[in-house]
């Protein structure tokens, strides 16, 4: 089993990244789990301003940001100051 290393990144640097259009998860169960984690992160962000960890991948490598989720659309995770991460590039979310 390989372990992926996620490199920490500041939220402000995300807007300079490029995101391919393909999905990073291949398992349908993991995609469902990610969607419910995003809903929970949105609730925690709006109600308690809780920071969560988002593990995602751009066109170069895997990255990790610790931030508050301000919104979720069908295709994007919205962070403070309008910074967005495409949902299909998110590996997982954790508290």
Image (cartoon, rainbow, N blue to C red):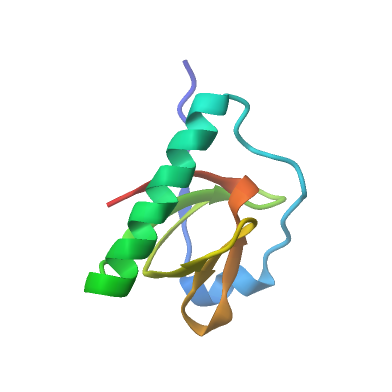
Q: Residue furthest right?
A: 21
- Please name whichever residue, 86 or 32, is drawn nearer the observer in this view of the structure: 32
Residue 53: percent from left, percent from top: 36, 55
Residue at (34% x, 54% y) in the render: 40
Residue 69 percent coordinates (x, y)? 41, 67
| Coordinates of residue 7 in the picture (x, y in percent) | 48, 52
Extreme-bottom residue of the structure: 81
Task: Name, please, the residue furthest toward the top.
Answer: 1
Q: Image check: 95 left or right of 2?
A: left
Is 38 or 19 nearer to us in this picture? Answer: 38
Q: Could you tell me which residue is drawn at 43 percent across and 36 percent down?
A: 33
Q: Nearer the viewer, residue 38 or 1?
A: 38
Q: Is residue 30 left or right of residue 17?
A: left
User: How many numbered discs sit on the rendered protein?
Assistant: 0
Above or below for 8 versus 83: above
Task: Please determine whether, in this image, residue 65 is positioned above or below residue 28.
Answer: below
Q: Measured along the vertical axis of the image, is residue 34 above or below residue 76?
A: above
Task: Locate residue 26: give its quadrant.
Answer: top right
Q: Is residue 43 visible?
A: yes
Residue 51 can be seen in this image: no
Image coordinates for residue 9, horizontal then vertical, percent:
48, 63
77 sits to left or right of 42: right
| Identity of the residue drawn at 67% across and 65% down | 17
Asked which quadrant contains residue 74, the reply is bottom right
């Amino acid at each position: 089993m390989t372990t992926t290393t996620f490199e920490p990144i500041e939220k402000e640097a995300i807007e300079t990244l490029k995101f391919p259009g393909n999905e990073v998860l291949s398992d349908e169960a993991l995609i469902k789990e990610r969607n419910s984690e995003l809903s929970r992160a949105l609730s925690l962000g709006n109600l308690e301003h809780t920071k969560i960890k988002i593990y995602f991948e751009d066109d170069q490598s895997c990255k990790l940001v610790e931030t508050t989720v301000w919104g979720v659309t069908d295709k994007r995770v919205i962070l403070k100051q309008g910074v967005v991460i495409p949902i299909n590039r998110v590996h997982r979310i954790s508290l």
